[in-house]
Amino acid sequence: MAGNLERALAIIELLSKQGGSMQLAAIADTLNIPRSGTHRLLAELSEQGYVRQDEHGEYVLALKLVSLALMWLSTGGVLDISQPVLDRLAAASGELARLGVVEDDHIIFVDKAQGAKSGLRYDPDMGSQPPLHCTASGQIWLSTMSDEEALELVSRQGGIGKAGPRGPKAPKTIQQFLQDLNGARKRGYGIASETYEAGMTSMAAVVRHPVAGLAVGVITLAGPTSRLSDARIEELAPALLEAASDMGAATLSSPYFKRSLRMMPVAAVAAVVKPVEAKRKGRPRTA
């Protein structure tokens, strides 16, 4: 049973990443599952409403998964608190503003607002999990950790030289990666110019829980490098940081972020909460 469940989930993940339709044989061969078993799993997923066959007999994801995801986001209060903040940031910047939430060892983008009204527009897939070491979102999140913790996390995801989508300026050495992290720490926001996609630049600020101080997400701005020059990035930085601060304050009213905080390691939460509580009570700070 567990094997079938894992295979069924693998089919759903493959179809979501594919973005289009796939033939049964292609699904079976890609996942190294016998075609007879793949047929049975697809039939079961179709019966449950998670996949469907198009007019050519190929398989695609059904809208049931989208409906479940939106329902989950709605009940978690994420979209309610994020959309006004993203709308303001997108309008002020004229670029794509997105919210990514920290989930285990990844950042998953769950909400967006498009500020570009004309010309080139950057609009990547929602729900994606971009590589951490060559994106502004990953850079600023990793910068909240020690260098050792950041390198260990990147290593678990394949390392600096991992094959996959990369821009021409992606960091190629550990030294370059750590230099990017230090830059993000000093500025307070991450910058990725053509490190993930050629011709595209993004900047990101971390969203922190206002009480615990832990990183629970990121807010990003992204657009064509031709528009996001160094001067423009510096000009937009205050608005980005303000949006991240506003989003952090709003997490107090979100059931999702409350659950996320409870799921974090107790030691990590205590290490931040106790100093905050001590400061509020007026206790003297030790050197």
Image: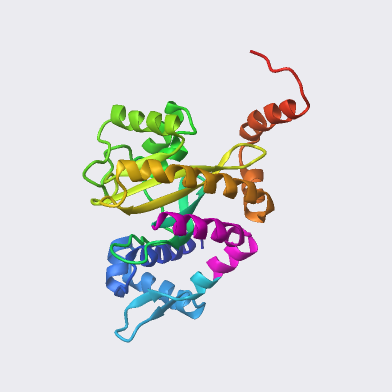
Q: Is residue 22 above or below residue 272?
A: below
Q: Which residue is farthest bottom?
A: 55
On the image, the x and y values in percent for residue 78 come to: 59, 58
On the image, the x and y values in percent for residue 56 come to: 29, 84
Residue nearer the viewer, 17 or 234: 234
Residue drawn at the location 26% of the way across and 31% of the way down: 173
Region rendered in magenta = 68-94
Residue nearer the viewer, 8 or 109: 109
**138 magenta-colored:** no
Residue drawn at the location 46% of the way across and 30% of the way down: 149
Locate residue 6 relative to residue 55 in the image: left or right. Answer: right
Residue 176 placement: quadrant: top left
**89 magenta-colored:** yes
Q: Is residue 76 above or below residue 180?
A: below
Q: Is residue 37 above or below residue 233?
A: below
Q: Is residue 33 above or below residue 197?
A: below
Residue nearer the viewer, 228 or 210: 228
Residue drawn at the location 46% of the way across and 62% of the way down: 113
On the image, the x and y values in percent for residue 287 come to: 63, 13
